[in-house]
């Protein structure tokens, strides 16, 4: 068993902590991390609860392979009810704190209630305590990280924290760990702030030592690392170029949403791409990208470590931003760049640093700025709301200004912190919001990659690419090539990706392995580590169970099939250029088939039959 | 032929596979906290540096030990701690100029790299060849090769 079989329960209202055994019957059905934490969450919370109320809970969960030598085995997820979407929130992060938590002996931390004053959770192996955090409340993640390391006098401690954006109520605030890795989406950081929980600091020295068959585990994980090394995407593309390898590719196929999704191609895509990050710049001869970096246990190492040009207007008088930190990933580069029309790589890198420093999701932020720019250009908002800043598409100054405002929640930053949906509603133009269930789109235009339209519409956490990354099949040909412009077969493709991904997200492994691995590669690793006879079939069944459980929660929370929708712009306004020219998102052709494949009713509700098939709570 | 661990920080991604391999080999658990090799992250500089014992010939730890618990393994050249002799006085941890001998509070003994008896698991686990196990007399070979490739005699020919 590679579960520690221990849960840490933190009662923030009372300031107490307690230990309890992991429900192993549930672990056999829901694996760990995303699935298992959702099972606990569904059991323990009222789906109608106010996401920012004291009865919402916040769960940090590792998977059975977290903290082991399986490649990428360092992931954890944050599960809660989202203030952005009102649906289940489940944000996955790498870095090092997930493995540290496991090494301290915990599968999961369940935080409940609301502390009367700011606190931080300090965990050293089997000891956990809540410490006052008044001195770090009001600090950025980066400053808090520094202060906590000094105060606890332990350079090896791993820290996850929220920034000032979360404290100010930004609805897409993230939990940032290890300075620049993020449980980024759906406002999980906002929930953490609502609980007055500023940070979690963890030191684990016990290690993970209870794999079921150590010899088998070492052999099979070594074999699977070789598979990653020999694959063109995980062995070459991602380490060399990061996820940014996609920028020019997606632009060329006409699926790079631009200027709040008015266009599907960005003329400056090459200026903000992986290739641009590797170009030496004029001022100091150094490229934006310093090196690639790995999360815990990852043999792919797609992470970007970057610097901003010291001569750039964003940082010329701010030496604190001259060092290296987490650089642009594709989704961030798209949202901060193409979607706002900004082709200035340094401005994007600066905005990305600020997103990490004060803990907010660059996808939702960039897309919200894009919506604000459209509102501005339409004359709906003016310099009166923006303290004189011209919010025009393509303005690097506007982008940097917006990032600084959201970081602290000052002035127009409060409006931007609402997210695109509420911002556009506030100013009477809801149709300009490019969101599903209140969450902003990521970087693939469904007019050019049809499967992603269904992916966004049906994602359990609102618009998201990571719930079923059909781009792998439709663009990269993994596991087999499908036509990105066709809706045929996409319902089945989306369902297959959703179920498999739900399983992967529950193991402790990274979904990026699935460019090279299928569940057939993952199952032997889980099985060597865990009791339960884990086959690819059992993982897939667990994945489908998890998907249905999340869906069931959302329905009980008040969502309906009508929320499985896309903005009118994508359904009515055809793509103007590129290979997808003339195409709209064909959601109406895919959705009924998808419901049918899911065994749901014609209006998207689970049936009792489906519930009992997967053993879901009645 | 004696071999040495050869470390090339430029290739390190900071993944900690080496730390897990080391702790698994020596302690039976995946536990970076008990690893004999450590990866240091210099965040502002964007650098990752693996660091461990270099097996000094005139080893400070060996000379400092009052009970002769540190012996050279003639086959591998590694300075090894004899657990049955070590009294956990930690004098070697003070003597070592590099900090690569450390106390293990679980066992009450010191731990240091012993090259896994000639098959160092850190090098085997490293996905980028930032840690390799090479001819002890030619640890500079790859660096020489890299520089050699830059001395292009043809460059000025045309």
Image: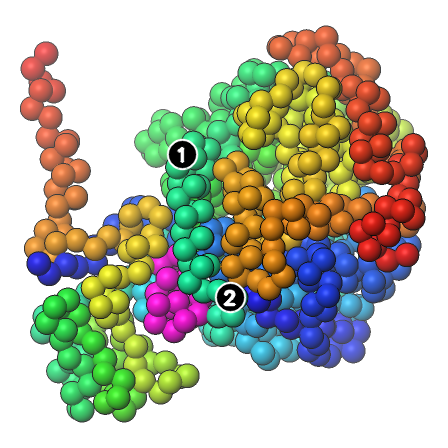
A445 falls in the magenta region: no
Residue at the spot 48% in from the left edge and 64% down from the top edge:
A213
Left or right? Give the position of A406 relative to A548.
Answer: left
Q: Which residue is mark 2?
A: A211
Q: Identify the image quadrant of the C terminus of chain A.
A: bottom right
- Seen in the picture, residue A441 relative to A410 is either above or below; the reply is above
Q: Is residue A83 left or right of residue A147?
A: right
* Quadrant of the frame with the N terminus of chain A: bottom right
What distance separates the C-alpha of mark 2 from that of mark 1?
30 Å
Q: Quadrant of residue A46?
A: bottom right
Image position of A109 (left or right of A562): left
User: Label 2 lies in what chain?
Assistant: A
Residue at image x 78%, y 14%?
A573
Q: Pointers 2 and 1 in contact (CB under 8 A)?
A: no
Q: Based on the displayed image, in which of its 4 quarters is residue B147 positioned?
A: top left
Q: What residue is rendered at 18% in x and 81% in y?
A: B70
Q: Note whether A2 is above or below A492 in the view shown.
A: below
Q: Tell me which numbered mark, 2 or 1, is placed earlier along the sequence.
A: 2
- Is A592 on the left or on the right of B89, as rendered? right
Local SS, label 2:
loop
Mark 1 residue element: helix
Q: Which residue is mark 1?
A: A236
Q: Position of residue A95 (x, y in %)?
A: 52, 54
Q: Residue B57's spot in the image, x, y percent?
A: 10, 70
Residue drawn at 22 percent across, 68 percent down: B117
Q: Which mark is residue A409?
A: none
Q: Chain of mark 1?
A: A
Q: Which residues are magenta?
A: B16-35
Q: Nearer the viewer, mark 2 or mark 1?
A: 2
């Amino acid at each position: 068993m590679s579960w520690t079989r221990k849960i840490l329960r933190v009662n923030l209202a009372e300031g107490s902590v307690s230990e309890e055994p992991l429900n192993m019957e549930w672990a056999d059905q829901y694996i760990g991390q995303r699935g298992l934490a959702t099972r606990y969450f569904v059991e323990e919370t009222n789906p109608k609860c106010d996401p920012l109320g004291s009865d919402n809970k916040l769960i940090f969960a590792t998977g059975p392979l977290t903290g082991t030598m399986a490649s990428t085995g360092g992931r954890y997820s944050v599960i809660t009810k989202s203030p952005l979407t009102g649906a289940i929130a489940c944000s996955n992060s790498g870095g090092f704190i997930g493995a540290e938590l496991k090494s301290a002996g915990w599968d999961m931390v369940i935080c409940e209630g609301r502390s009367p004053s700011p606190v931080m959770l300090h965990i050293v192996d089997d000891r956990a305590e809540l410490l006052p955090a008044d001195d770090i409340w009001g600090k950025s993640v980066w400053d808090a990280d520094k202060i906590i390391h000094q105060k606890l006098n332990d350079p090896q401690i791993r820290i996850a924290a929220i920034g000032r954006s979360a404290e100010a109520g930004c609805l897409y605030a993230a939990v940032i760990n290890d300075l620049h890795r993020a449980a980024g989406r759906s406002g999980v950081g906002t929930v953490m702030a609502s609980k007055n929980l500023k940070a979690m600091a963890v030191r684990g020295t016990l290690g993970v030592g209870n794999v079921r068959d150590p010899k088998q585990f070492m052999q099979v994980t070594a074999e699977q690392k070789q598979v990653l090394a020999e694959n063109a995407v995980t062995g070459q593309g991602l380490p060399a170029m990061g996820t940014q390898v996609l920028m020019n590719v997606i632009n060329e196929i006409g699926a790079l949403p631009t200027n709040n999704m008015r266009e599907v191609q960005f003329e400056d895509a090459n200026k903000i791409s992986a290739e641009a990050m590797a170009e030496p710049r004029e001022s100091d001869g150094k490229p934006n990208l310093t090196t690639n970096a790995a999360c815990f246990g990852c043999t792919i190492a797609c992470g970007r470590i970057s610097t901003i040009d010291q001569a750039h207007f964003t940082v010329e008088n701010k030496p604190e931003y001259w060092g290296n930190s987490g650089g642009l990933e594709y989704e961030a580069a798209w949202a901060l760049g193409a979607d706002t029309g900004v082709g200035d790589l340094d401005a994007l890198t600066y905005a990305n640093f600020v997103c990490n420093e004060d803990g907010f999701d660059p996808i939702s932020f960039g897309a919200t700025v894009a919506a604000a720019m459209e509102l501005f250009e339409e004359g709906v908002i003016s310099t009166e709301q923006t303290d004189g800043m011209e919010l025009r598409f393509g303005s690097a100054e506007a982008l940097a200004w917006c990032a600084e405002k959201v970081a602290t929640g000052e002035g127009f930053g409060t409006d931007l912190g609402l997210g695109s949906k509420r911002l556009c509603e506030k100013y009477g133009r809801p149709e300009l919001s490019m969101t599903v269930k209140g969450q902003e789109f990521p970087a693939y235009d469904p007019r050019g990659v049809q499967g992603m339209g269904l992916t966004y519409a049906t994602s359990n956490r609102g618009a998201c690419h990571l719930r079923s990354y059909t781009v792998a099949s439709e663009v990269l040909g993994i596991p087999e090539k499908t036509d990105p412009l066709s809706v045929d077969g996409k319902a089945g493709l989306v369902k297959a990706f959703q179920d498999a991904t739900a399983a992967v997200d529950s193991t402790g492994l990274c979904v990026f392995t699935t460019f090279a691995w299928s569940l057939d590669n993952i199952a032997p690793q889980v099985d060597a580590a865990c009791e339960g006879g884990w086959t690819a079939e059992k993982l897939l069944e667990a994945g489908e169970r998890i998907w249905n459980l999340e869906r069931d929660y959302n329905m009980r929370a008040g969502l309906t099939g009508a929320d499985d929708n896309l903005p009118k712009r994508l359904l009515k306004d055809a793509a103007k250029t590129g290979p997808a020219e003339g195409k709209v998102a064909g959601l109406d052709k895919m959705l009924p088939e998808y419901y049918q494949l899911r065994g749901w009713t014609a209006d998207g509700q689970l049936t009792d039959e489906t519930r009992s098939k997967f053993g879901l709570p009645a | 032929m004696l071999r040495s661990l050869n470390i090339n920080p430029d290739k390190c991604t900071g993944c900690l596979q080496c730390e897990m391999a080391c702790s698994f080999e020596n302690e039976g658990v995946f536990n970076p906290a008990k690893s004999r090799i450590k990866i240091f992250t210099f965040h502002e500089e964007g650098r990752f540096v693996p660091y461990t014992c270099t097996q000094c010939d005139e080893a400070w730890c060996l000379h400092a030990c009052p009970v002769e618990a540190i012996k050279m393994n003639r086959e591998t050249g590694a300075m090894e701690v004899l657990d049955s002799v070590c009294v956990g006085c930690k004098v070697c941890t003070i003597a070592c100029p590099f900090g690569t001998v450390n106390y293990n509070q679980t066992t009450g003994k010191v731990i240091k790299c012993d090259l896994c008896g000639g098959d160092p698991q850190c090098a085997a686990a490293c996905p980028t060849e930032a840690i390799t196990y090479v001819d002890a007399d030619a640890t500079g070979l790859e660096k020489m090769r890299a520089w050699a490739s830059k001395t292009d005699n043809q460059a000025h020919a045309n």
